[in-house]
């Protein structure tokens, strides 16, 4: 067929290939999903909308569509296989879709996730009220748009790895997330690494790898 | 001569023309300074180095060179003519030269200035330890390089105007201050306005205008 | 719920949280509005369109939708609580929606606002004809797109703080407002501070803080 | 030799090839100059420093080095061959070297030039005081750095072609002249065309072509 | 009303205010048009679509809509009042709408225009075949997208002013016209000045000013 | 007519003018196609959608529309006139439309093409499995979006010319293909040259020229 | 003094404040170092040159300067306190200074580091020859300039966290490391997170945090 | 040692590893050169200055330093092993160093090179005068700075592969070669592929690969 699915990936990297659905037709997604599902017990589809997901779900016995994450998981829900957990923190309410992409990714890969949403620095007491959840995690994902300052504040308060996700929330000189991206790359706090703008999947994946160490 | 000094500026804007010395020869600076000093009791020269300042100082009876601000003030030291004060806050120690340009500008224009330096968000308790000084000011200048996150945190904690100054401190994707500039323009906190990268003069000037309201 | 509304903000900054509605569903806006309105006498919603506003208005006894500002104010109209006024100046007619966002914000927070629209430098006599209104204000907001030159001209003629708002009006190398933004950040006039492209809200907010000093 | 001088240019475009000396050795410049001078009565060298100019001048009977323009003219001074004149206007004193490059270029090509320097919009009365000189010209060159707003103001006040030259004077978000360049390209005034940053030569050349129409 | 039309512009600059219709409602355009038409015999509206133009035309006795230029001219067709003519040259067929905006602008202001379209450098013999028309003009407008190389070739072959208009035709690293804009600003040919991307109006206006010298 | 078709191109460059259909009306495309087809046995139309292609096909006896390449070929299918072949390699499945534009272009110009799709570096064994096909080609086209790393890996493994095509597949800091473009321009492997983002046509054309050497 | 050292940092984040020496005078560095050393058994100074380091070393009994890392460690060499190790991989030899900054940082914080240098994709067999060292690490740091493609290849071959460091090695459209930065942010391989250009320190720090989990 | 030289490269790609000397010490270059020379009969060093070259030359019996190319070739001069030749064309004299890097690279790899320098489009007759040399080549390298328009003109006149090299010659909005780079990537002529700014080596290498087909 048109695609050359990487069916060996679990052996090499520990996880099967995830299907990035943006720009693929529903028929293409289906074929790739079937190919992976023939070897794996679970397939994660990201950036998939309600309609494409509905089409795919008809072909599988068990699957779940996560609306606010734009994710479809084919196969049974995974059990949590770690004792430690991942904290996923957002600055605003508008960052939640990206956070949910990260959360569903991590949960699909067997992680326990705790969500701490809408605690941005404009009202920093909201962060301090949830600090124990954040400090108790094995790895922290911080998701923020606009100027993304929350990352630096969290970075200065924890002794665990922090994965930062800039979002494209904002306008004008935000330049579709560039502002938050630069903030996170230039953070004066230590222990912060960064993924692409709006890349909830990448953050959830890396957090899962770290949480399973 | 070559220059067309704006000797009417005090009448219109309340302050005489300040001499921006970068890229001017010491002879040019001297001529402009003499022209302004013939009508004003005090002249501020910014972006002036030790050597040019020394040359100029020979021609005036009273003058002070501020080394870490790269500023020269010709004429007597001004008295403080306001009851309220300006707080000037920096994230790091490397931001101090820009802060001093702001401070000397504000002091030259008759303001009481309180300095709160090196309280960036990597160790946010340092900010909270000085919060009463900041909250007591009539106007706050926040100066930060790298990702500039301090501005948003301060903005969420005060009910006074905040003037943000991005500095060019940093490297790589800092892009000579672009990172901090975008942070400050996109802040999720309210009441923050921004001046050019490294423009301590502009911040000190605007803070002075507000402090004299 | 999904949101973690900052109900303590009035105590800290003097104003309640404003709801930025772009990218939020009408149900989300309603919940946040109800949460804030339970503690405050007035709620400002910005970047809200006619339809969402209509939905929200059904749930409150008193509210006003400002069409050309894309703002909804829940609660009664505020009284003017200041003697001084804010001048809001635009270069063109296309900048008016941003100006109205600034004006409604300022009026909602108790300010007297005087509007001076369409006085850009292509016909600079229009500015001079209104100069007394501008010079009489306690703080001036200048709003301009394209090349934004009006800001520098106004800055050279007043002795009060000037808040500059670049707009995204223009095309080609305007780069969605970047041109006006850079103009304002690099102004050769003094006393000018800048907010994000199209950020009428931020300018109205900061002007209100200054007008209440 | 290494160079392939365009000795036919006067026939096609009305002017001989000008030597852009930046990045050429003094020996290269000399060879090119000799080649052109063998066919033309005058050779213009731009972006040439004091040392290279001195070396070249030894080889020619008559030549003049213009220090603040970084220009060398080989051959006799040209007579003014036009009745109308070119006005060259700058915003600040730091823009003068670019203005002089334009002026020497225009004068070398036989034009009468009137200089109006340091009349930027921070003190706009300085412009109005010289407006009759500007309005009397057949073509106006406006040269400005920082935010370059002067161009738009002049553009709104004259009925003659305006050639705008952005300069690299400024710092921070000036981005080496980008700010002034964008201002000039996006001007809300009409009748303005633009040349490259610091391109005094190009402006002087185009002004000469227009002045000779 | 909302607008502050510059009714004095003809006296100052020789031409009435043109209405830039993008982003204005048809009612706004009508009011501005009526205000200008009360003092001028002709009104030019640019960036206007078929529908808005139809609405406006109902209110005036005589008017013409130019479809491929997106221009509406209210009032009678102007007579040609110059002996010399303007050549308008394009590189491709896709650049024609911008060229027509320039042509209609110039014709509305009384100029004789000769069109030379689709003569880009990929087939440079097409340019040479029309060179006499181009060389016979008093001023040449060159319009090109993609890499815009045509401008430099024309610039090297004429002794008249060349106004270059970059268009947004292209894709990928064309960056919506940036590529052609930079080409034109950096041209190795002399006598070229540049207007904003897609700014046919500006080029036609400036060409008219020059053609009337 | 409006267009000035380059009917001499085959003589000069070996190939007739290809019609770039984006932004042209179907009537314009038809006229240009008829003009070229009157002199050539085959016409290639790129960036054409299903509807426009259908309209054009009515007017010609023989033609083929390639759906996933957005290409229409008017005239009979060409015979393969070369012994050597071109390998066209993609990193992902989303890059296939660009690859097909390259493939159809090359086939239309008489080349034998071998397709190697979806062998990106995330699963590099897929590349090694097809290495003999790639190494056997006379010229290799590598097409990749996101970070485009495949190009460098292929470049280090072949001794034939490699033409790299960045695609706009990706999001966030991909900046519509800029990321892959910069990767390819800065490759540490040798023998790689680059065409514009998404320019499958250009790659297929250049590969054909090389394959016919 | 001028600095407000964060002496509480070890308690909060597990590590003391590191001194970033670029732009600080040797006297400033000394004071900050003494302040930290009074509470900690070891102080790391980065971006310090030979001369400043020599000055500082006079004031401490035990210290080591790492020439090719531009790092100074004050205090005794730390013991390795982890069983697992960190692999630090570079694409070229020019990336080694950044790699050494990462390595010294990690070693100073008690980690075992294995170096795998100069294995870039232009000769990919060099990478495969060292793959077991890389796959055996608990966390992998990949450092590359130019186009940075090595990161994606490594990312596809390991099941451990990968921290990517773009370097500023390259020229032209490398834009001082932007090219490698974008490559790493847009990698098609999973499990990769990114730090700032040339930020060896940040990578070593984060790797240490992960290696100690 | 520090470097991991790719001694297998000739087998894979047909050419040994070339040493890019910028940023390497003379001792590092020597070691790498000795390692390659132990297996190959010739080593090419690029971006090497006079001093480093002198140091290296002491250690080898036969070597040649090319001053205006900044290249050092260790070993005997290669014989020309092809019948066809490569044409290397520049727009200006300032582009010659990049052209010589390309020429020496191609000659070192056994090619016959014909140089056509200083034939830019400002005087396009210079190009036509040399057209037969260019059209007779098997592959053409076109090197240009400023706006780089020469590439498109050449591209429209030959039926052989054209490799375009943008140079960083220019100033202002040239942005260190970005202008010429974008021109070449967006060329309306076909058959053009592009290498990095100032990358004469890459162009010479690719031209050699094609010339040997
Ligand atoms: N028009 C506006 N522009 C910028 N910020 C705004 C605007 N309206 C409200 N805000 C602020 O945006 C923040 C809301 O973020 P969120 O939690 O995502 O709703 C609050 O701090 C508001 O005060
Ligand atoms: N197509 C156009 N491109 C650029 N400027 C234009 C155009 N058409 C009209 N203008 C100018 O735009 C200004 C109108 O600004 P506004 O007050 O927002 O309508 C006037 O000065 C017009 O002369
Ligand atoms: N440090 C500074 N940053 C920005 N502007 C300044 C600074 N110092 C002085 N200025 C202003 O720069 C302008 C001087 O322009 P010029 O005529 O070139 O000297 C005056 O309006 C000054 O008030
Ligand atoms: N997909 C394509 N991408 C880039 N250029 C193309 C493409 N298809 C055709 N062309 C070229 O674009 C030019 C057409 O420009 P125009 O006169 O505007 O149609 C011709 O030189 C074609 O050879
Ligand atoms: Mg919120
Ligand atoms: Mg500090
Ligand atoms: Mg108007
Ligand atoms: Mg001045
Ligand atoms: Mg065409
Ligand atoms: Mg795939
Ligand atoms: Mg190497
Ligand atoms: Mg030349």
Image (cartoon, coloured by chain):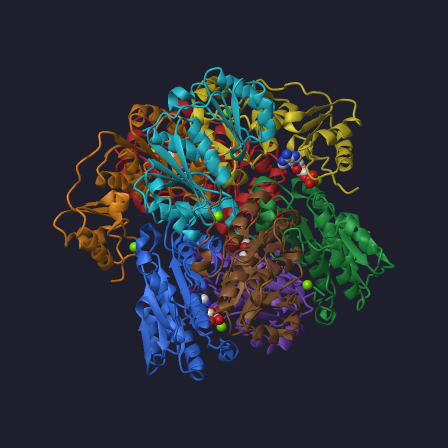
Chain colours: A orange, B yellow, C red, D green, E purple, F blue, G cyan, H brown
Give how far across and how far down residue C171 sits, in percent.
Answer: 50, 54
Camera-nearest residue between A29 and H24: H24
Q: In which quadrant of the rendered image does the N terminus of chain C lie?
A: top left
Residue sitting farthest toward the left: A61
Residue sitting farthest toward the right: D61
State the image quarter where residue A58 is shown: bottom left
Q: Is residue B10 above or below residue D159?
A: above
The residue positioned 49% from the left and 51% from the top of the image is C175
Horizontal side of D173 relative to H50 (left or right) equals left
Give how far across and how far down residue F73 sits, in percent.
Answer: 36, 76
Q: Is residue D168 above or below residue A162?
A: below
State the image quarter where residue G56 is shown: top right
The answer to whether residue E24 is visible is no
Camera-nearest residue between F138 and A98: F138
Horizontal side of B139 relative to D60 (left or right) equals left
Camera-nearest residue between H158 and H177: H158
Give how far across and how far down residue B88 sits, in percent.
Answer: 54, 24
The answer to whether residue B58 is visible is yes
Q: Is residue B206 above or below residue G4?
A: below
Horizontal side of F127 relative to A28 (left or right) equals right
Horizontal side of D80 relative to C120 (left or right) equals right
Disc tally is 0
Give how far across and how far down residue F213 sits, in percent.
Answer: 47, 74
């Amino acid at each position: 067929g048109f695609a050359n699915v990487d069916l060996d990936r679990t052996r090499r990297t520990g996880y099967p290939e995830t299907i990035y659905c943006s720009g693929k037709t529903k028929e293409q997604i289906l074929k790739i999903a079937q190919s992976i599902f023939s070897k794996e017990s679970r397939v994660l589809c990201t950036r998939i909308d309600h309609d494409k997901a509905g089409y795919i779900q008809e072909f599988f016995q068990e699957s779940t569509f996560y609306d606010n994450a734009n994710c479809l998981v084919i196969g049974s829900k995974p059990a949590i296989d770690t004792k430690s957990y991942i904290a996923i923190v957002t600055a605003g309410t508008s960052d939640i879709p990206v956070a949910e992409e990260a959360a569903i990714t991590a949960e699909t890969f067997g992680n326990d996730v705790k969500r701490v949403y809408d605690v941005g620095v404009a009202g920093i007491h909201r962060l301090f009220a949830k600090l124990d959840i954040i400090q108790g995690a094995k790895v922290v994902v911080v998701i923020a748009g606009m100027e993304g300052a929350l990352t630096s504040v969290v970075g200065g308060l924890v002794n665990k790895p922090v994965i930062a996700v800039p979002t494209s929330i904002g306008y004008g000189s935000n330049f579709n997330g560039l502002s938050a991206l630069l903030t996170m790359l230039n953070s004066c706090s230590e222990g912060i690494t960064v993924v692409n703008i709006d890349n909830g999947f990448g953050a959830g994946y890396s957090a899962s790898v770290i949480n399973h160490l």
